[in-house]
Amino acid sequence: MSAPRRGMTMMELLIALFIFLIGVVGLVAAMPTGVNSAAKVVFQDAAVHLSRSKFAEFRRDRVDPRVDLKDNAPYMDGASSPPRRQELKNGNPGGWRDFAHGVGDTYEHFDDIERYQWRIDQATLQLVGLDEAANYVPKINGGTDQGLTRVTIVINQKGTKNEYRFTQYMYSYEK
Amino acid sequence: MRHPRAIKGGFTVIEMMVVVSICLALMLMVVPMFQVTTRTVQNVEEKLSAYEAARNILDLFEQEVRQAMTNERGEHFSIKAKAFADTDRFTPDEDNNPATLDPTRYYFSRRQADCVNTIKPQPGSFFVNNAAPWQRTALVDGSVVHPFNYPTQFLYKPDTHEAWFSSIRTSLLYQIPENDAWQLVRHGETTKTRAQLLDDVGLIETAMVFQARNNEPDLTPAWTLDWPSEPPNRFMAGNELKQQIRFQDWIDDYTRKQITGINILDLAIAFWDDKDGKFYDMRDDQIVYFAPPPRALRFTITVCDVQKRKRITLQRVVQIPVGTGDGVVVNRIDPNTDNDYLLPSPHNRYKDLNFVEPGL
């Protein structure tokens, strides 16, 4: 004859429920991670638009990248003549600049534009061709200056460490 | 004697009620959290899809308008500006009067329907093959030649053109025509009227339209030797690409192209004024012919999906490689006159759109 089966006690049941609760809480806690990832993709999309616009602005203004895109150059930080065409630094640590979005400004209607800021990575603002192997660009006639400058724009979501870097090689325009 | 099942020691009713109550309480706590999270995920996903559409639109517009060129026949680069009041409940009416145009752009029931017209090169170059004499040139895919070959004998080489007129706009400005069933460019869809589009803004779509531009005499109806592609026929005010007509015959397959089909609410095109150092939006019902083209344009688009769940507004600056003009438009904000058009070229001239296209 088999032994009589015993049911669960209240204590066992509560323990089981507690474990179940931990599982549910863990599941719910994981969901914001997914939301954050999606939000990052939105930011990435916005950053693509904004970086392309900034490069277009530099080309529109016929900049000499190694001269005009330096911090404190008249084009970047000058107050008046020659006309300043870029936003001044916004005071946030890291030398960031807002995208101009006041009435009549270039980015006036860009959704959530006040959440983004940008800067040029000054360290990478250098001649292409100095290091042939690193730059994938061959030297011409043994020289090093092909007139190409690497320009990297960094776009950051304010209040976060989220940032994307976009690099293009730019020639110097004759003005 | 105890009932045989009693010795198993199962739950009592009280225990069951306690357990069920605890479970219920847990579910009640968890469900709202799931609901909020699900709504947030849905919200972000909708936003993502809108961003994806906007990226596609702006990438298309950018690569298209950057192909704008000038030629020795005279430059052609024009922007039109037109706005309409929609009657869709999706967009709030700013002034509570559906009959009037809301003053604020993008958010309310004012739909911006601008347009930029350019000339772009024929994408391709020629090589000589060993076919019959009149077939000895053919296109090399992916290559770019120009300026400018002058393909003649167009009827024998219908896929070679001197250049293309290009027009970037939305179907709200010029509706996309129903096409011949056998050409199936739009799969036989009927043309939606502007009233239909304004009543359901989720139906408005991008419309990029291209028309071959050839150095060809018009041989019909009777060898008139009219040269329709020559100035002033093609370059006069109001002679840019406007309302499309249905594809008429096989030759339209070679001389007309269109890229359409991405949902869009607003398309606004601003030009760069290099003297003032800022972008200017166009005044409503204005068309400006730039000579030479401005250095840059700024596209502002509002995008929503067909279901009208989410809407975003984005902007992109696009440099025009052949844009050497200062972008200064004299009397830009004067609403009454268009006599600046009479000033000699090169000059950025504007006309009243109602005069150029009455009833648009």
Image (tube, helix red, strand yellow):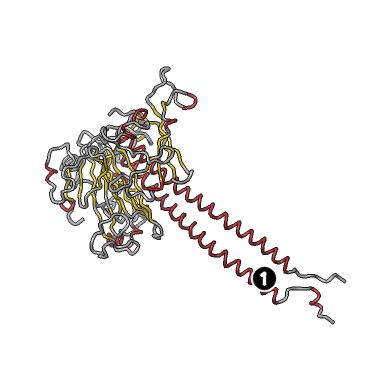
Q: Is mark 1 on a helix, strand or loop?
A: helix
Left or right of B321, for residue A13: right
Q: Where is residue A35 in the image (x, y as percent from the top left)?
A: 51, 53
Residue at the farthest right position: A1
Q: Where is residue B43 in the image (x, y as percent from the top left)?
A: 45, 57
Left or right of B173, for residue A120: right
Q: To which chain does the residue with label 1 belong?
A: B
The answer to which of B114 and A101 lies nearer the viewer is: A101
Q: Position of residue B157 (x, y in %)?
A: 30, 38
The answer to which of A13 and B165 lies nearer the viewer is: A13
The answer to which of A49 and A104 lies nearer the viewer is: A104
Residue at the farthest bottom position: B1
Q: How many marks?
A: 1
Left or right of B325, for residue B188: right
- Residue B100 visible to an observer of this rendering: yes
Q: Position of residue A45 (x, y in %)?
A: 43, 46
**B198 versus B315 height, above or below:** below
Amino acid type at mark 1: Val
Examine the image and state in which quarter residue B213 appears.
top left
Q: Label 1 neighbourhood size at 10 Å, few (<14), some (14-19), many (20+)?
A: some
The image quadrant where one finds the N terminus of chain B is bottom right
The image quadrant where one finds the C terminus of chain B is bottom left
Left or right of A121, for residue B270: left
- Residue B179 visible to an observer of this rendering: no
Tell me the residue that label 1 is attached to. B19
**A93 versus A29 height, above or below:** above
